[in-house]
Amino acid sequence: MQAFPGAWRLVPGQALLHHGAGDEHLVFNDLSGDTHLLDAQAMQVLRALQAGPLAPAALQGLCGEAQEPEDIAALLAELQELMLVQPA
């Protein structure tokens, strides 16, 4: 999996409407009209990006030291496919 060296952000205009607790969160993408079931780690990344762009290394620290850079890169790629995040 390719590493993403630059910063990432929420897709502009994304309200990040969500509901859930623990390991399961429903996220409504108000730009696409899609609803997604995400795990706690993905939700934690999205919440962090609400404050502004962050580099993958900062997200890796947020998600815990056990996370490998490849895991964060894969998560960002998945969230990008869902049109929730994009490179800043």
Image (spheres, rainbow, N blue to C red):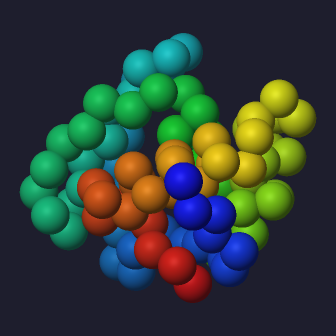
Left or right for 33, reference 19: left
Q: What's the residue at 30%, 30% (across, down)?
A: 37
Whether residue 52 is visible to the viewer of this picture, yes or no, is no
Q: Residue furthest front?
A: 1
Quarter of the figure that contains the N terminus? bottom right
Indicate the position of residue 75 as horizontal and vertical percent values: 51, 47
Q: Nearer the viewer, residue 5 or 40?
A: 5
Q: What's the residue at 52%, 39% (across, down)?
A: 43
Indicate the position of residue 88 as horizontal and vertical percent values: 57, 84
Q: Residue furthest left?
A: 33
Does residue 85 lie above or below 16 as drawn? below
Does residue 18 lie above or below 58 as drawn? above
| Number of disc labels | 0
Q: Residue furthest top?
A: 22
Indicate the position of residue 38 as horizontal and vertical percent values: 39, 32
- Indicate the quadrant where residue 84 lies: bottom left
Q: What's the residue at 75%, 40% (across, down)?
A: 68
- Indicate the quadrant where residue 64 lies: top right
Left or right for 6, reference 42: right
Whether residue 85 is visible to the viewer of this picture, yes or no, is yes
Left or right for 34, reference 20: left
Q: What's the residue at 74%, 69% (across, down)?
A: 55
Does residue 20 lie above or below 83 as drawn? above
Does residue 81 lie above or below 47 as drawn? below
Q: Nearer the viewer, residue 30 or 75?
A: 75
- Indicate the quadrant where residue 66 lies: top right
